[in-house]
Amino acid sequence: MTLDEIRHNIDRVDKEIKALFQERMELADQVAQVKAQTGDDIFKPDREIAIIDRLTTDIEPDIKKEYIALIKRIMEVSRKYQYGRTLELRDCLDLTWLTEEPSLSQIAMKKSELYICNMVSKDLVTTVDEFAQVGQLIQNKQVDAGIGILEDVSISASKELHSMLVNEHLYINRCDIVNDSGVRKKVVLFSPHLVVLPNHNRIKIMFVCRNKSGSIASIFSMISDYNVNLTEIHSQPNEQLEWNYEFYAEIEANLLSKETQALIFQLMNETYAFQILGSYNCEGDF
């Protein structure tokens, strides 16, 4: 058989796959409609494992891994579609935000970082020694917000500030790129309020993957499927879960978008733990 003949057969099989895929997605839509009414979970790992085991009992060993990879991708794409359809059919995204920036009269910062403050007048700033104290002042309503250096771009990120945002359930509302003696730094303003504005182009998230093979790859694939750019990611050990990590990521997206809401909804349901840590506009030379 010539290469042209082989390619002709591949084209024929691809057309058959296309028709079956369209039928598969029509069935996925029916599933989404039922689950939107019942509130049933879209992601059911045990059922997916059972399906994979059943479908691979008679597959040739030399292509079994490839067939499993194909089945998993079909399931992932089907779930992506179902999350979006579910949000269309039922308002079930457990997330609220402000659409206007709150007024700020008192800000807290670490003493060691006051030199870089240009978001507000230094006269409005209360200084302390640690980010944990900044968080306590905000929670006790002694100040309205905090400012801190989140990251030295391409060098390192502040574990202390990231952990404080998670533990105190605070949100980044603003991010400036500041050149500090040749080092670009992300300086952020954070408050108890998630604020979402039309000009925002970044969302900061924290997630913990389920402890299984391929979990982080699945998250990356999920983000890519929504055509969302991952602009930053780093990890640190989770203090409650041994041999597990918290991942801190920044994605190029806006929460007002229905597609972004579907991605967040899917991440909420397919990670072990998940938090939004902010919505903001970030411009600068990266």
Image (tube, grey):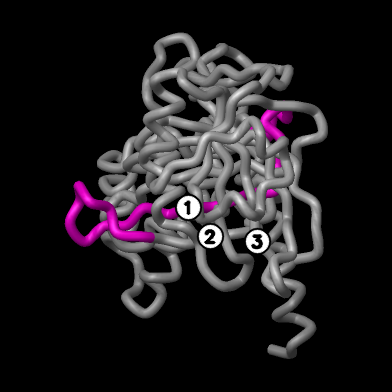
Q: Please identify, in this view, whether the residue under mark 3 or under mark 1 is nearer the observer.
A: 3
199 displayed left or right of 174: right
The answer to which of marks 3 and 2 sits earlier in the sequence is 3
Residue identifier under label 2? 233
Q: Are marks 3 and 1 in contact (CB under 8 Å)?
A: no
How many numbered discs? 3
Residue identifier under label 3? 185
Q: Amino acid at mark 1?
A: Tyr
Residue identifier under label 1? 248
Q: Residue furthest front?
A: 123
Residue 186 percent coordinates (x, y):
64, 55
Residue drawn where x is 75% and y is 36% of the image: 200
Instruction: Decide which of 191, 108 is in the foreground and name it.
Output: 108
Crowding at dot 2, Cα within 10 Å, few <14 / some 14-19 / many 20+, comes out as some
Instruction: Decide which of 125, 47 is in the foreground and name it.
Output: 125
Residue 261, relative to residue 94: is it above or below? below
Residue drawn where x is 32% and y is 57% of the image: 245
Residue drawn where x is 38% and y is 26% of the image: 41
Residue 178 percent coordinates (x, y):
73, 58
Q: Where are the magenta residues, as a range?
A: 236-260
Residue 235 percent coordinates (x, y):
41, 60
Q: Are marks 1 and 2 in contact (CB under 8 Å)?
A: yes
Residue drawn where x is 51% and y is 16% of the image: 92
Quadrant containing the C terminus is bottom right
The answer to which of marks 1 and 2 sits earlier in the sequence is 2
Label 1 secondary element? strand
